[in-house]
Image: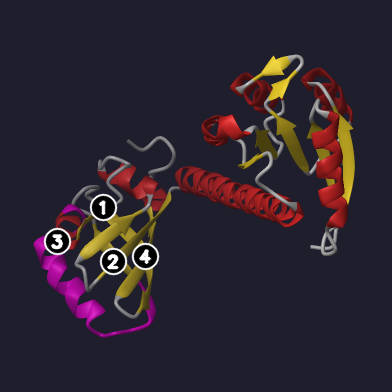
Amino acid sequence: MSAELKILLIEDTPGDAFLIKFYLGESISHKFDFNHVDTLEKAFEKLRENQYDIILMDLNLPDSVGLESVKKLIETFPNNLVIVLTGLIDERVGLEAVRYGAQDFLVKGKFDSKVLVSSIIFSYERYNLNKKLFKTATDLAMGESRFNYMQEITGIGFVELDLTKKTVNLSDYTLKVLGYPIEQKSIPLDLFLQKMFTNNEHKVLEEYLAQNAEKGEYSFTSVTFKQPVRVRWERRENLILGVIYYNEIGLTATAN
């Protein structure tokens, strides 16, 4: 990591503030832009005007004491990385601060330059990794939501037949059309066939799939809808991926 990290230290003891600044300056592998305030109120003023990569904070300040300090900071500025500095008798409080959202805690008098810098770099990388993972999860959730919405609008559903496990994974829209709860996601293959095909078409379908073609199109008279339904499918080893055109039989977003 070559970029300079911007540090805000909230510490009212001049000796401790000097020592932390000295420790940061000793680092050869990392550079830090050091900023210091001695009260929580001054820290809030700084945070309203500037962005910082890491906040180092003492829990016992002139205008805020103990866990209340870290709670106020994180509640007011939730998108900031906080490392707590505690006294020798406050180690338990440091652990509690982590539970409130701090990334780490250091006990005064028990760390040197190497430990301080390691804590900062590790916390910074972990914090940013968690942000990326959260964004990815959010994007996936939003993508799935849009995907399900588009299925309802277009009247097109998706199924995945697992010929090994004898199960069928269904898209949310297909579950809705067939009358299954959205949470179910997967149903036994034989139950799906009963829901979709007549007994005679079971055999026809089995013979059709036994041809081992890579892809194709199949039309069947649905047991549920009492009219022909078109399916485009593609085989991937023991999986068969199908697209069902419910829109061609008049089913769209209003389907129940």
Please report the residue visible at 62 percent of the width from the left and 19 percent of the height from the top: 68
Mark 3 lies on residue:
190
Q: Earlier in the sequence, mark 1 or mark 2?
A: 2
Residue at the top extreme, as displayed: 63
Asked if the residue under mark 2 is in contact with the one under mark 4, i.e. CB atoms within 8 Å, the reply is yes
Circle 1 sits on which residue?
227
Please say whether residue 5 is visible from this viewpoint. Answer: no
Foreground mark, 1 or 4? 4
Identify the image quadrant of residue 36.
top right
Question: Magenta segment, which residues?
Answer: 195-217
Within-10-Å neighbours for mark 2: few <14, some 14–19, many 20+: many
Contact, CB < 8 Å: mark 3 with mark 2?
no
Tell me which numbered mark, 4 or 3, is placed earlier along the sequence.
3
- Name the residue carrying label 4: 242
Q: Nearer the viewer, residue 164 or 208?
A: 164
Is residue 120 visible in this depiction of the protein?
A: yes
Q: Amino acid at mark 4?
A: Gly
